[in-house]
Amino acid sequence: MRLIEVKHPLVDHKLTTLRRQETPSAVFRQLVDELVTLLAYEATREISVETVDIVTPVQATQGRQLTEPRPIVVPILRAGLGMLEGLMRLLPTAEVGFLGMKRDEQTLEIDTYANRLPEDLSGRQCFVVDPMLATGHTLVDATNFLLEKGASDVTCVCLLAAPEGLKTLEESIGDRANVTVVVAAVDERLNEASYIVPGLGDAGDRLYGIVD
Ligand code: URA
């Protein structure tokens, strides 16, 4: 597993505002969108391209374009939805699949309640978006699910990660597959409720309000 922590003053600035408890939902959503676009630039560095012949108004030349099959973007519902547009802005031809996963706050077990993905992901590059890599269990399940369907590689784009979650993901995936995690920051730790510290709170609630 490869970890990329994106170092950029604009990432730091936006993340700081995102973390503030007084930042309202509308600003929070806008900042998540902007941050994802910055992270997506790094996350797509290894995206598959091919050389093609083209003709400009001046002369024939060669360029590079994304290969088929198209990449697939997988937001983890619900908080991952807040990151979808930011990634699709850079990858407008990508397909979108959905995984609904919810953490039971008592047992911390992951329940997969929705799955809208092609059956066969052979050779597909997958970009999973989920803002908070906390215990890592959601991303372990999501990544294994995509690899079992034949995905060639999986890039997880997250805003924040906890060291504990990164360790869990690393131990589960190891070197058996091409998995990359791209984050704006790795925080200190998880607290007793498995929230990231200092973190930004519940990303889903801050994006969309509280739903029980
Ligand atoms: N999910 C969140 O939304 N926030 C955390 O800190 C951990 C998991």
Image: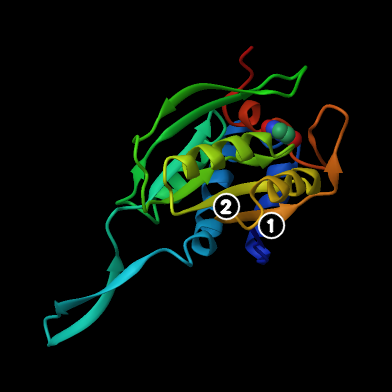
Residue at screen point 64% across, 18% down: 210
Q: Please, what is the three-letter code of the amino acid marked with disc 2?
A: Leu
Front-lying residue, 104 or 28: 104
List the single residue furthest toward the top: 212
The x, y position of residue 38, in whole percent, is: 54, 59
Looking at this view, name the residue that lies furthest to the bottom. Answer: 59
The percent position of residue 30, horizontal first and vertical second, equals 54, 43
2 vs 1, front mark: 2
Who is closer to the viewer here, 200 or 6? 6
Secondary element at image label 1 = helix
Vertical relation: 68 (above or below) 149: below
Circle nearer the N terminus (2, 1) = 1
> In this orientation, which residue lies closer to the viewer: 63 or 141?
141
Question: Residue visible at 56% across and 26% down?
Answer: 101
Q: In the drawing, what numbered circle is on residue 13?
A: 1
Could you say where residue 156 lies in the image, as x and y percent from the top left?
A: 56, 49
Task: Tell me the CA gap for discs 2 and 1.
Answer: 10 Å
Q: Quadrant of residue 25?
A: top right
Tell me if mark 2 has few (under 14), some (14-19) or many (20+) residues whose alpha carbon lies within 10 angstroms of its own: many
Q: Quadrant of the N terminus?
A: bottom right
Quadrant position of ligand 1 = top right
Q: Position of 14 compared to 91: left or right? A: right
Label ID, residue 35:
2
Q: What's under tag 1, amino acid-wise?
A: His
Give the residue at x 15% y 80%: 56
Left or right, 30 with reference to 67: right
